[in-house]
Image (cartoon, rainbow, N blue to C red):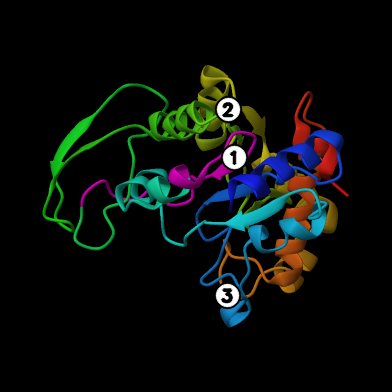
Amino acid sequence: MTLLSKILTIALLFVGLVPPEKPTVYLVGDSTVRCGSGKGGGGLWGWGSFLSDELDTTKVSVVNKAMGGRSSRTYIQEGRWNDVHDQLQEGDYVIIQFGHNDSGPVNDDFRARGTIKGNGEETEEIDNILTKRREIVKSYGWYIRKYVADTKAKGAIPIVCSLVARNIWEDGKITRNTNDYTQWAKEAAEMEGAYFIDLNDLVATKYEELGQDYVTKKLFIEDHTHTNKAGAKINAELVSEAIKKLEDCGLSALVK
């Protein structure tokens, strides 16, 4: 762009003839946010594939950078968070949802993706069997706090979600993660000053309204974690409804 064109663009922005570049909503998480390529392979979908349907995309863009099989730890370890962080601009949003894979083993030769349970400063130094590297593993809450702090450092706005509820029932109720990953995600968000959405409870409540038979037959295909298209759309709607209720959050005004 030449100097003259830059001056003209700035002038047009000033008088309101050219809208400013719209912010981006980046989604960071696991397969419940983006399953596979995010295009419905095997009939499985994550809610992130449909969040753009719920937002005014003339004013905001949605980029789903979630990756199946990752935990809050391995998403960072593999450099995926750096890729998102490098793109962040002031005024962007980052929606963070991990937890489903954080309960796995801290060290094994298969995935080595577990995190220390809780929201503390505990660490575990390991010789990672899978990566063949020395690694210091932190708590789930520590990793969530890192996402939030890194996001805010770029002038972007973090929104932490608790993990979506699984299709696991007991006495007609969905089993929730109230006292573990939901609690730790909420604590981490509060400690770093991020918005928080209790997606675990919102999804569980919705499933209970629909009933076990309907949810099992109509929203899930092959396991109790990954939804089909209909289930993913329901979860995306729940996320958008929760965003709309966030106080003093600019993104709430962009929910359809």
Query: Mark number for residue 48?
Result: none
Q: Which of disc 3 and disc 1 is earlier in sequence?
A: 1
Number of other residues with Cα within 10 Å of mark 2, as a class: few under 14, some 14 to 19, many 20 or more: many
Q: Position of residue 133 (x, y in %)?
A: 12, 49
Residue at the image position 59 percent from the left and 39 percent from the top: 162
| Front residue of this view, candidates 81 and 61 | 61
Q: Compared to 15, does 37 lie above or below? A: below
Tell me if 54 is positioned left or right of 127 in this view.
right
Which quadrant of the figure has residue 141?
top left
Picture residue at 59% right of the left edge, 65% below the top: 226
Residue 156 visible in the displayed image = yes
User: Helix, strand, or loop for circle 1?
Assistant: loop
In this picture, residue 91 sits left or right of residue 250 = left
Q: CA distance from mark 2 to mark 3?
A: 30 Å
- Which residue is tagged 2? 186
Badge 2 marks a residue whose secondary structure is helix
Taking 229 as reference, is 36 left or right? left
Residue pictured at 67% horizontal, 59% vertical: 47
Circles 2, 1 touching at the beta carbon (< 8 Å): yes
Q: Which residues are magenta?
A: 85-107
Residue 162's disc is: 1
- Mark nearer the N terminus (2 vs 3): 2
Q: Seen from this angle, which residue lies furthest bottom?
A: 42
Residue 102 visible: no
- Magenta-colored stretch includes residue 150: no
